[in-house]
Image (spheres, rainbow, N blue to C red):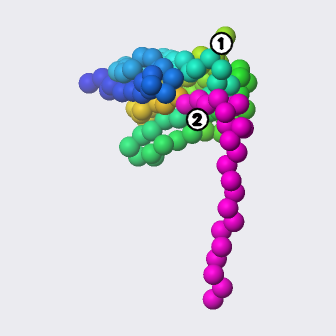
Amino acid sequence: MDEKIILEMQRHTGAGVSQSPRHRITERGQAVSPGCDPISDHAPLYWYRQTLEQGLEFLIHFFNKNATNMSGMPNDWFSAERRKGSSSTLKIQPTEQGNSALYLCASYSAIAWHSHPLSVHKLHTPSP
């Protein structure tokens, strides 16, 4: 009996991020490359995956075409790239049973982010 691997890419076109394909069922050992196409002026781009066992996991962060943080890439068969324009591809090859997950891509406008800095609040702990 062949094991099937289910990959789901969430599509948030209202937020300006489009992912494809929306769903992908593949056999173990096949290569899968979900794509992400954010709004063109969004320099930062993130890939995440969500599994039932682990919850939401960070995979990789890009700023423009450069990968600046790959600490979440789980192993040697995961990779990602950011091509011309702003689109990105996450590559999973070969797929394994543990790769069944919801894969998410997120981006934001670096200009808007820096123009509205978050305020920092000091945590106050009462004295005993």
- Is 96 left, or right, of 73 in this rendering? left
Q: Residue at position x 53%, y 35% from top? A: 48
Q: In which quadrant is the C terminus drawn?
A: bottom right
Residue 109 among those drawn in magenta: yes
Q: Residue at position x 61%, y 39% from top? A: 72
Q: Residue furthest front?
A: 115
- Foreground of the two, 6 or 2: 6
Q: Tag on residue 59?
A: 2
Q: Residue at position x 62%, y 17% from top? A: 40
Instruction: Assess disc 1: are there few (<14), some (14-19) or many (≥20) residues with their C-alpha within 10 Å of its C-alpha.
Output: some
Query: How far apart are labels 2 and 1 at the CA level?
Result: 21 Å
Q: Pointer 1: what residue?
A: 85
Q: Residue at position x 65%, y 12% from top? A: 85
Q: Main secondary structure of the magenta part?
A: loop
Q: Is residue 2 above or below residue 58?
A: above
Q: In which quadrant is the N terminus drawn?
A: top left
